[in-house]
Image: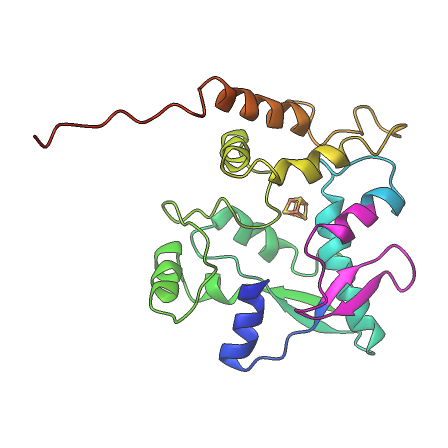
Amino acid sequence: MRFVQACSDNWNVPIIWVEYQHTEPYFKVVNFETASRNGEPFEDLIRNGSRRYLPNPMTRYCTVDLKIKAAQRYLFSIGWDEWENLVGIRADEPRRVSKIRANPSDGNKGITRFMPLATANVTKEEVGKFWENNTFDLELPNINGITYHGNCDLCFLKKATAVMSLIAEKPERAIWWAKMETLITEPTIANGGIFRTDRPSYASMLKFSADQIDMFDPNEEAIACFCGD
Ligand code: SF4
């Protein structure tokens, strides 16, 4: 959020902040100060949206409803019926580039997706250099060009090892996800109450992470290293 606001402040770009809500018009305009910080729109979608199951790797309705449709609905509301979406896919992501080029409208009349970075042959290394030389950036750890902390913090699409290390780093991150896995009690699809069927629940991962830490005495004192003597 701070990063989006920094883009607006540093580059003098007006940014409209839009959030999902489950009642008409299914979006609301917020700003840096009023935007939700604790996953409230996502929880609203899970609790009160039309689907009685959690998003999962096969059906990522969170992306569609929280991001794509909310933005579209805002633009329709101000009278737009035709526009271009600029997508930040790079030249070194050929599979995604081909997918979008094969279907630029994604089935939406009046919308065309363009990938200026891919068209200009910009790769991950150049993007990294740009941000290194910029006065601000995402302020997230970057491990060999991968930012595991980006997007929704414990997104079910992230690698299990990344999710576990994010939980180990900050266990409270798992609380929201574990709570979501208790909300759908009568799912309309099999295993619809959990985000993934091929992984332990978020509550189990949180417990596992806590148990790993509990294996060691928190009061144990470090043993002095005398290798410099
Ligand atoms: S980052 Fe993951 S959890 Fe968040 S909207 Fe995208 S798919 Fe859904």
Where is residue 47? Give x, y as percent: 86, 43
From the viewer's side, name the closer residue of 118 and 179.
179
**Quick check: is 44 in the magenta stretch?**
yes
From the viewer's side, name the closer residue of 155 and 58.
155
**Is residue 148 visible in the rendered structure shown here?**
yes
* Residue depicted at x 78% and y 46%: 43
From the viewer's side, name the closer residue of 228 and 177.
228
- The quadrant of the image that shows the N terminus is bottom right
In the rendered view, does 8 fall on the left or right side of 135? right
| Direction left: furthest residue | 229
In the rendered view, does 140 fall on the left or right side of 76? left
Where is residue 121? Give x, y as percent: 40, 62
Q: Which residues are magenta?
A: 18-45
| Direction top: furthest residue | 215
- Above or below, 179 against 7 in this view is above
In the rendered view, does 166 fall on the left or right side of 52? left
Tally of numbered discs: 0
Where is residue 125? Give x, y as percent: 35, 56
Name the colouring of the figure: rainbow
- The quadrant of the image that shows the C terminus is top left
**Is residue 199 visible in the rendered structure shown here?**
no
* Residue depicted at x 66% and y 69%: 32
* Residue depicted at x 52% and y 37%: 166
From the viewer's side, name the closer residue of 124 and 147.
147
* Residue depicted at x 45% and y 58%: 139
Q: Quadrant of residue 82?
A: bottom right
- Above or below, 161 against 211 in this view is below
- Above or below, 23 against 80 in this view is above
